[in-house]
Amino acid sequence: MANTVLVGAQWGDEGKGKIIDVLTSEVDVVARYQGGNNAGHTVIIGDAKYVLHLLPSGMLHEGKQCVIGNGVVIDPTALAAEINELSEKGIDIGDRLLISDRAHIVFPYHGALDASREAACRKENKIGTTKRGIGPAYGDKMSRVGLRLGDLRDPAFPQLLTERMNEVNRVLEAMGAEPLDTAKLITGICEAARVIEPFIGDSITFLGEAVRDGKSILFEGAQGTMLDIDFGSYPFVTSSNSTAGGACTGTGVPPNKIDRVLGVIKTYTTRVGEGPFPTELTDEIGELLAREGNEFGATTGRPRRCGWFDAVVARYSAMINGFDVWAMTKLDVLDKLATIKICVAYECDGERYETVPGNVRILARCTPVYEEMPGWQSPTGDITVYEDLPQAARDYVERLVELTGVKLGILSVGAPRKSTLRVGM
Ligand code: GDP
Ligand code: IMO
Ligand code: MG
């Protein structure tokens, strides 16, 4: 398979984990490029359910090499727990995992800062973060005060962390939060470091050689375009570039080695956490989508907000990422609906918007302009050939393709591997 970047096109949870799992058998390497354990990627294999937060979803395929790139931020304790959990489930990690020595560390103080910023500073303007310390960790990286996984091997590591903690504890106290016990923190990190240390290495050279040798790479995006730090509904976003460009900065693979960009998009929309969501449904249809789609956060368990498909977001996302092809997911969730709406534009203060406005306060006041299509009201979950779908379901999918200008490659009609229709790829 061509070197492919896989990106969530909406607000996350589009089903990226499932699509990566389906495509892993066709590539040599799977590489995560951004985010941290705020992500929750679900893969269903037979009766087993795996939720991966930091490990690439490709880990579940025997023999596949996986990389956690320099652009990811890593909580060593969470990663050690995830590695141990997979090993206990009989997944052989062996020498299949390589974690970049340049990836920044998420420390417990990042989580403490994340939580107290939300509670004490932002209050009613809170972002609704996962409280995994993602924002403060990327903040340290950009402020050039972060520590990286490679630093764990440095004899000076305890001293470097102690110096950092002196400042952090002053900040925590000023925010009214409890200071952290530095000695305890160092002990905890060193314990986790023993589990992850064998996997830390030079991922940049590894991926460079993989490209040189003609191996194929699948770049695993986390979160989604509308959560991107630059292009999302700022400030209600995460702190990394979840869009396609992040694959290059987050792994060190140059743009001219990327062959294809695949957008993963739900056939409706969901969002976890706060922030504007123009097509949100707070009525019984929203409840039906949440129920049929089992829309609960894979990381925090929070209920996901649900709404109609937003073609404005999809078009914007396609433009930024340069999507060559869609993997559309969760069509089966719409099976019971008599009619289905699609948002084709926004209106705000008498003005029509064909693209996502940059000002979040305008986005929050946008109302959707809908067109309506008939539903198919029959189950699609067991269908394995596109042509066997009810005509109304095909019409709906084809309308989404037409509105977004991106062709269909994969259509997912259920969580298991077998519920995957290969259409144009
Ligand atoms: P990710 O973060 O993008 O990997 O997505 P999540 O794993 O957080 O959420 C997607 C959820 O939908 C998971 O529970 C998947 O098992 C499930 N899922 C994926 N594709 C489909 C599909 O086509 N139909 C249904 N019903 N569920 C799906
Ligand atoms: P996957 O990879 C959905 C959301 C949080 C919050 C905002 C900022 O599973 O699609 P953060 O903890 O990152 O500072 O929170 O981003 N968020 C996600 N929503 N799926 C995710 O990941 C998310 N990762 C973060 O809910 O609104
Ligand atoms: Mg998820």
Image (tube, rainbow, N blue to C red):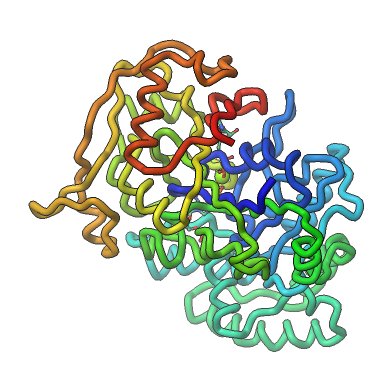
The one nearer the camera, 50 or 156, is: 50
Instruction: Point out residue 354 in the picture as x, y percentages from the top left corner.
Output: 23, 51
For residue 358, above or below residue 186:
above
Residue at the spot 55% in from the left edge and 72% down from the top edge: 136
The one nearer the camera, 356 or 260, is: 260
The quadrant of the picture showing ligand 1 is top right
Residue at the spot 80% in from the left edge and 66% down from the top edge: 209
* Quadrant in the rendering for residue 103: bottom right
Is 238 left or right of 158, judged from the image as shown? Answer: left
Please identify the quadrant where the C terminus is shown. top right
Q: Residue 107: tell me if it is visible.
A: no
Instruction: Point out residue 101 in the picture as x, y percentages from the top left corner.
Output: 77, 72
Is 287 left or right of 265, judged from the image as shown? Answer: left
Is 44 left or right of 7, judged from the image as shown? Answer: right
For residue 274, above or below residue 422:
below
Please identify the quadrant where the N terminus is shown. top right
The one nearer the camera, 159 or 76, is: 76
